[in-house]
């Protein structure tokens, strides 16, 4: 059969999608389905792993049918997933034993505070590269074992399996209760706070610290190897690639050389930069992580900076303030003025992420005068996303001496030309949007296709990359300097706003 | 009907509108549904009663925002560039021509520059000609027929004849009339009720767009038309 393809699943926060790609890396079809999100109390966010698996079972045949293809034409399957979302399931029934706790959930804050109070921060950082935060999967697993009746005993007895979403899907796809393969990939594992970032293996001291029995953990594998063969759907197709979604986007953007960087602009924003084969040791403002490990090759590392609010700030302007009727119209409004009118918005609605990491920060609007209109506010909203990206890039430059040559962007906000121009202006680099915007699925497909020889090497993948648009810097250096100073002053007003409880 | 809804001072039931206009209920139902779908009439979710919609107040504003259009069209226009290996433009009507509001580079092409904001003349570009033919808010005929190349149509009679053909077949083309060696094919983008709101074009070297000394390649016309239908459908659902 000549017409073979690669299938990819992106198991995301709000929806799961399946895409089919051809040999040129072009999209053949896309099927998508949203799943329920449950917020049982403030700070909690849960999902039903069984529902997500049911969706995958329907989406994959749907995507194939759309493309007019047969499963025998699928050379391999790759998987990308929302990272840090934690699932525990019963190995004999194949069902999850508790709702999956998602990456947005902050219920582990007491547990994490406790670790910090015990003085574990340095040790955790030395081993995992991460600072103890509610963000990561390990503390969630510990929470489930502590708070769900009987789970700890059953886990110790080997009745339960743990994992992030890719583990859950691979286990189910390869047969589930009937011989399912229990694995995770090194990028997902690097976000658990349980893995030694230097060896790529579970670390006993971290397992002891969090009191997690090793028996339920998946084995850690590279991002490009055959983990197993699908039983249903895609019977007989090898699962040959798995990456966390942000690393998948980095791979899909073909950021294969040290210094290559991408930023995904969705609800929040995630900037990752390839740092090469040495484990990076940045300061506490940005996180070292695994970019990818291909088969037996040495892993390639990355540094990541995440921004809590990007698109969600635009949504706030639309839904809470009702200043704009649709999100894209922020550009129309912002373009009606030449500058921000002296007004700056720091969107620390639930604290600030990289590089400030201040959970007590809260949002501020500063520089208000009678001159300021809603159009200036719209501009300040977009500038906030640009300046937050700049902060992450500056932190990476200060910590690691790495400077960007270009920034590759993806995500919904890349349709906003004003924002893309602002990014280029404040970063003083070219900003590039690739032709295939579904970089997460593409990255997973690339990893799987490399494993089975569908694509021969990284150079072939780089060759497939086409640029859809480039924005080049136009801002005067003096203006950039002045505006960056103003931004930093605005952030100072936001920091530490929350009073400790009486 | 709009006067009755506006003057009633409260939401009206379907039967009340039918009585006031002395028309059968099924007729009123069809009319009021259409007015509701374009936003001129609002229907209360709970009571199903009708009142004037916001759309009627905003009638003086253009219905579609170019940034909304771009956001709807981005994935489709990327796929079109990928499929045709040509550059993609989306245009919006401007007093002097077709203003480019979205631009996707030609895959594998040399270094390219974003052309957002450029205004292409109505009579000398595929994007402009399709707007003259189909898009609301464009002049019935351009004021000046300026010459850009040897091939630019500068005779009003010749342009009228071409516009006649364009309206009949639903697409326009450009063969070196604006820039020597550059060709293009354009189709309208339709919003509510089939109203032309903008236009979609693919453009590139003439030999990549046209059959040797003949009309544009059928595959390119087809791909562009298909993409426009997909974008229009998404506009109709979301506008």
Image (cartoon, rainbow, N blue to C red):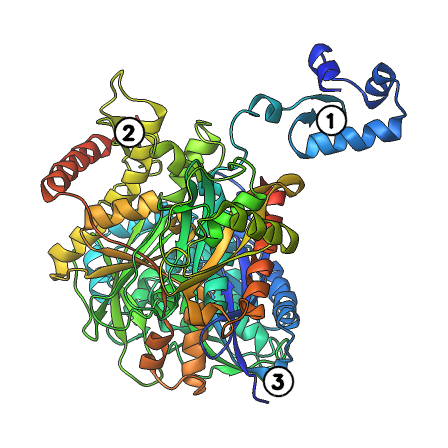
Residue at the image point whose x is 55% and y is 60% from the top: B224
Residues at discs 2 and 1 in contact (Cβ within 8 Å): no
Task: Give the Cα distance between marks 2 and 3.
Answer: 56 Å
Total count of labels: 3
Q: Are marks 2 and 3 on the same chain?
A: yes
Residues at discs 2 and 3 in contact (Cβ within 8 Å): no
Q: Secondary structure at mark 1?
A: loop
Task: Give the Cα distance between marks 1 and 3.
Answer: 51 Å
Question: Residue B65: x, y in percent?
Answer: 48, 37
Q: Which residue is mark 1?
A: B46
Label 3 resides on the chain identified as: A
Name the residue furthest left.
Answer: A478
Q: Nearer the viewer, residue B183 or A270?
A: B183
Question: Residue A407: x, y in percent?
Answer: 26, 58
Mark yes or no: residue A153 visible: yes
Q: Which residue is mark 3?
A: A72
Residues at discs 1 and 3 in contact (Cβ within 8 Å): no
């Amino acid at each position: 059969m000549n017409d073979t393809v690669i299938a990819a699943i992106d198991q995301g926060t709000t929806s799961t999608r399946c895409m089919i790609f051809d040999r040129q890396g072009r999209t053949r079809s896309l099927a998508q389905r949203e799943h329920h999100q449950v917020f049982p109390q403030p700070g909690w966010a849960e999902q039903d792993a069984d529902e997500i698996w049911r969706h995958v079972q329907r989406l994959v045949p749907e995507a194939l049918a759309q493309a007019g293809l047969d499963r025998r034409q699928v050379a391999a399957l790759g998987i990308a997933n929302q990272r840090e979302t934690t699932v525990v399931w019963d190995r004999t029934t194949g069902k999850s034993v508790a709702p999956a706790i998602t990456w947005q959930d902050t219920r582990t804050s007491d547990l994490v505070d406790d670790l910090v109070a015990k003085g574990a921060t340095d040790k955790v950082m030395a081993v995992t590269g991460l600072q103890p935060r509610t963000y990561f999967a390990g503390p969630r697993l510990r929470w489930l074992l502590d708070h769900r009746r009987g789970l700890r005993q059953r886990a110790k007895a080997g009745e339960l399996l743990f994992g992030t979403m890719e583990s859950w899907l691979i286990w189910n796809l390869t047969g589930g209760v009937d011989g399912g393969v229990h694995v995770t990939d090194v990028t997902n594992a690097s976000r658990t706070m349980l893995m030694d970032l230097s060896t790529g293996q579970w670390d006993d001291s971290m397992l002891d610290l969090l009191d997690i029995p090793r028996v339920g953990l998946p084995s850690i594998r590279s991002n490009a190897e055959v983990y197993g063969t699908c039983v249903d759907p895609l019977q007989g197709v090898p699962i040959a690639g798995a990456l966390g979604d942000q690393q998948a986007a980095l791979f899909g953007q073909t950021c294969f050389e040290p210094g290559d960087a991408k930023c995904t602009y969705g609800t929040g924003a995630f900037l990752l930069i390839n740092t090469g084969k040495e484990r990076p040791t940045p300061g506490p403002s940005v996180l070292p992580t695994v970019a990818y490990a291909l088969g037996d090759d040495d892993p390639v590392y990355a540094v990541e900076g995440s921004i809590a609010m990007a698109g969600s700030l635009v949504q706030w302007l639309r839904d809470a303030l009702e200043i704009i009727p649709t999100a894209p119209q922020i550009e129309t409004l912002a373009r009606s003025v030449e500058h921000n009118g002296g007004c700056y918005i720091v969107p620390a609605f639930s604290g600030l992420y990289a590089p400030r990491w201040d959970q007590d920060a809260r949002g501020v609007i500063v520089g208000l005068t009678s001159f300021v209109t809603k159009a200036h506010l719209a501009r300040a909203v977009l500038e906030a996303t640009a300046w937050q990206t700049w902060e992450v890039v500056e932190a990476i430059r200060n910590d690691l001496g790495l400077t960007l040559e270009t920034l590759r962007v993806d995500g919904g906000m890349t349709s906003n030309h004003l924002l893309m121009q602002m990014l280029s202006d404040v970063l003083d680099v070219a900003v590039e949007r690739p032709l295939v915007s579904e970089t997460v699925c593409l990255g997973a497909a690339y990893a799987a296709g490399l494993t089975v020889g569908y694509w021969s090497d990284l150079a072939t993948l780089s060759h497939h990359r086409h640029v859809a648009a480039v924005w080049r810097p136009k801002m005067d250096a003096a203006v950039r300097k002045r505006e960056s100073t103003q931004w930093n002053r605005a952030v100072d007003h936001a920091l530490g706003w929350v009073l400790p409880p009486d | 009907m709009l006067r009755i809804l506006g003057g009633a001072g409260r939401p009206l039931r379907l039967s009340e509108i039918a009585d006031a206009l002395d028309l059968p209920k099924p007729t009123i139902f069809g009319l009021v549904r259409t007015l509701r779908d374009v936003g001129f009439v609002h229907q209360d979710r709970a009571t199903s009663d009708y009142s004037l919609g916001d759309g009627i107040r905003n009638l003086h504003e253009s219905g579609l925002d170019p940034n909304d259009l771009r956001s709807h069209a981005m994935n489709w226009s990327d796929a079109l560039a990928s499929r045709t290996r040509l550059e993609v433009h989306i245009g919006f009507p401007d007093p002097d021509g077709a203003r480019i509001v979205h631009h996707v580079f030609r895959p594998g092409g040399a270094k390219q520059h974003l052309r957002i904001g450029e205004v292409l003349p109505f009579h000398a570009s595929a994007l402009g000609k399709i707007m003259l033919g189909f898009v609301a808010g464009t002049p019935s005929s351009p004021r000046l027929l300026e010459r850009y190349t040897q091939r630019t149509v500068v005779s009003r009679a010749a342009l009228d004849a071409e516009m006649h053909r364009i309206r009949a077949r639903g697409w326009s083309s450009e063969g070196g009339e604006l820039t020597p060696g550059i060709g293009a094919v354009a189709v309208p983008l339709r919003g509510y009720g089939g109203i032309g709101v903008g236009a979609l074009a693919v453009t590139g070297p003439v030999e990549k767009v046209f059959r040797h000394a003949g009309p544009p390649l059928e595959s390119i016309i087809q791909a562009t038309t298909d993409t426009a239908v997909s974008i229009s459908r998404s506009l109709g659902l979301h506008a």
